[in-house]
Amino acid sequence: MTENFYFQGTHTTFINKPVDTVVRDFQNTYEQAPAQDDLTRLLTLVLNSRDLPDTDREEAAGAVHDLARITAEPEPDAATALTRLERLREIVTAGADIAQPALAIVTSVAGMLGGVTQTEWAATADVRVDWGATPRA
């Protein structure tokens, strides 16, 4: 069964497209973003989560798009990106099925932006994160 989504953001509109189409469009749009692989995995996790309500999945997907756009800029606005990452962290911790791999990705992207370290992030997280785990998409 393929689920369709409607997302509308600053530079993106996805109307009733299957998850794999949304992910492929994301990859094509943000192929120059330094964290594109991580953000693609995060987007896939968010869209496929069964524990997140639709509104949270929509908000998280929009935040992933914002992060890709921000990180693709010549001089990324790290403060804005870290704010988006913090909100993503709040959202994904509510999804038991994606919390661990999603938090690992969020922390990785934060580190790339000069944000908090994995240890600092884990100290404030509500879930245990296995940093050696490979995120699954």
Image (tube, helix red, strand yellow):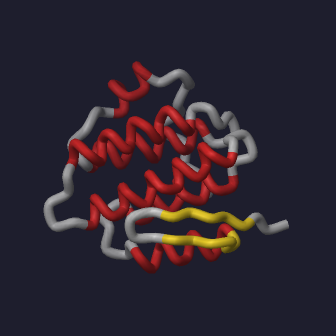
Q: In this view, does 14 lie to the left or right of 114?
A: right
Where is the C terminus found, in terms of image quarters?
bottom right
Q: Nearer the viewer, residue 33 or 88?
A: 88
* 110 is higher (above) or lower (below) than 125: below
Residue furthest to the left in view is 75
Q: Quadrant of residue 48?
A: bottom right
At x 32% / y 43%, what residue is drawn? 110
Q: Quadrant of the N terminus?
A: bottom right
Instruction: Give me the residue at 51% from left, 71% from top.
Output: 13
The front one of 92 and 80 is 80
The percent coordinates of residue 123 (x first, y second) are 40, 20
Work out whether 111 lies above or below 63.
Answer: above
Does residue 87 show up?
Answer: yes
Is residue 102 rendered to the left or right of residue 77?
Answer: right
**Residue 136 showing in the rendered view:** no
**Relative depth, front residue between 96 and 65:** 65
Furthest-bottom residue in this view: 28
Q: Across the whole image, how many numbered discs are drawn on residues?
A: 0
Q: Residue at x 38, y 28 (%)?
A: 121
Task: Give the image location of residue 46, x and y in percent.
Answer: 60, 51
Q: Where is residue 108 in the image (x, y as percent from the top left)?
A: 37, 45
At 25% from the left edge and 38% from the top edge, which residue is drawn? 115
The image shows residue 6 at horizontal and vertical percentages of: 62, 65
Give the side of residue 59 with respect to residue 45, left or right: left
